[in-house]
Image (cartoon, rainbow, N blue to C red):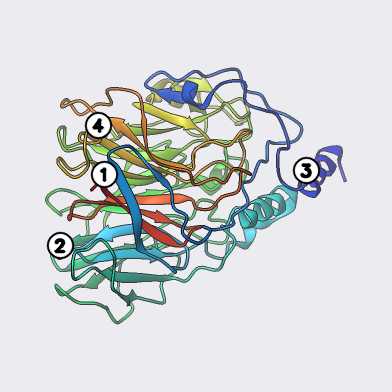
Amino acid sequence: MGMHRIALLLAVAAGLSGCGETARLEVSDGFGPSPQLPEPNKTLIPTVNVAPAIGWPQGAKPVAAAGTQVAAFAEGLDHPRWLYVLPNGDVLVAETNAPPKPEDGKGIRGWIMGKAMSRAGAGVPSANRISLLRDSDHDGVAETRTTFIENLNSPFGMALVGNDFYVADTDRLLRFNYQPGATSIQGPGTLVAVLPGGPLNHHWTKNVIASRDGTKLYVTVGSNSNVGENGLDKEKGRAAIWEVDPASGKQRLFASGLRNPNGMAWEPHSGQLWTAVNERDEIGSDLVPDYITSVKDGGFYGWPYSYYGQNIDKRVSPQDPQRVAQAIAPDYAVGPHTASLGLTFAEPGVLPPPFENGAFIGQHGSWNRKPHSGYKVIFVPFSTAGKPAGKPIDLLSGFLSDEGKAMGRPVGVINDQRGGLLVADDVGNKIWRVSKAQ
């Protein structure tokens, strides 16, 4: 066994906490349109700093920003990750986790990753279902819960167009018939498109959003590695957003070089598609900032060859200078290793100033930065021109205990169409609802 492998094993034996280097910059230095990008700091032992998942103590909850309040909309869920609100106000939640992916767990690195993810709360089996939550009396708490669709395969994104309800499983896009008011859907669904999956399937979450007119669907597909170490042949069709014609099932590459895009939303002023992207690891606590960005048709955003435009990642071989020259720098950084997943835009009048015009981002939280980053829901103000215009503001914080343990981890965020913002918490197994303070 080589020294590098022995060092990695020692890192795990040491408790998967605090190993490797320490950040030299503040998290805030990795925010904004021009984040600080220091030289890579690749160490013998990759930084492993897991916040162990413990759940919320009785009566505890996140800290809401001034002028807002937070309460549990639903509790006792099974790893709730993603949210969708139907036209009648019913809330759908994907109770889901990673599928079996035996090729992704091989070797020392895969073993360590598995141990770290389990400690962070991501090791539970997937419930493979979408549940429906109904708040009939509009008091901000769901009274009923039903199984909407079951026997799925690590479902994540959801979208409704007319009576067609789409679900992005980890390896396929499915269509179901939805009747308004229905509390469940039976049957296996109809295959619309095959999505990259398989026994490796490193970044397994697939999201879907419909175009404004409903004629096109956009589907996110994360990379099959951190930075191409499994071979670039394993990345075909990945690290990308695909456009799907639901009528014919035809697919075309809409944007690429996006390491792990998750949240997608239409910016209300410009009408542009935006996405939240997780950037690469293992070159230090200060690199590389995750980001939100508008998505250009045909745009290439650098992964794996470069980050933040033309900043070359020397770990990638062979390089592709032509592709690097085409790489688009993202619009707005949201901090290194924050695991920014959820993305939705504010609806005017729902929350008080300053939360009226901009983007809410669910930051799942770091496991490989020291000290921790993320573990909150932030708000990025936007101008009426449809671009970020100011420093981020915490909407929900306090997901970590004083001892650095994760009581919760926010993921999906969405407006509930009833004066609140919903936040899925896959460690607390709750959905939080943020509203104006009474």
Q: Specify whether 316 is left or right of 242.
A: right
Q: How far apart are the two marked residues, 1 and 4, measured between alpha carbons? A: 20 Å
Local SS, label 2: loop
Q: How far apart are the two marked residues, 1 and 2, measured between alpha carbons? A: 17 Å
Say which residue label 1 marks: 265
Foreground pick, 91 / 263: 91
Q: How far apart are the two marked residues, 1 and 3, measured between alpha carbons? A: 39 Å
Disc nearest the viewer among 3 and 4:
4
Query: Compared to 39, does 274 lie above or below?
Result: below
| Tag of residue 86 | none
Q: Residue at x 33, y 75 (%)?
A: 149
Say which residue label 4 marks: 354
Instruction: Give residue 314's position: percent from left, percent from top.
Output: 61, 25
Local SS, label 3: helix
In the rendered structure, are the residues bearing label 3 and label 4 in contact, judged by CB atoms less than 8 Å apart? Answer: no
In the rendered structure, are the residues bearing label 4 and label 2 in contact, judged by CB atoms less than 8 Å apart? Answer: no
Say which residue label 2 marks: 87
Q: Specify whether 390 is left or right of 202.
A: left
Say which residue label 3 marks: 11
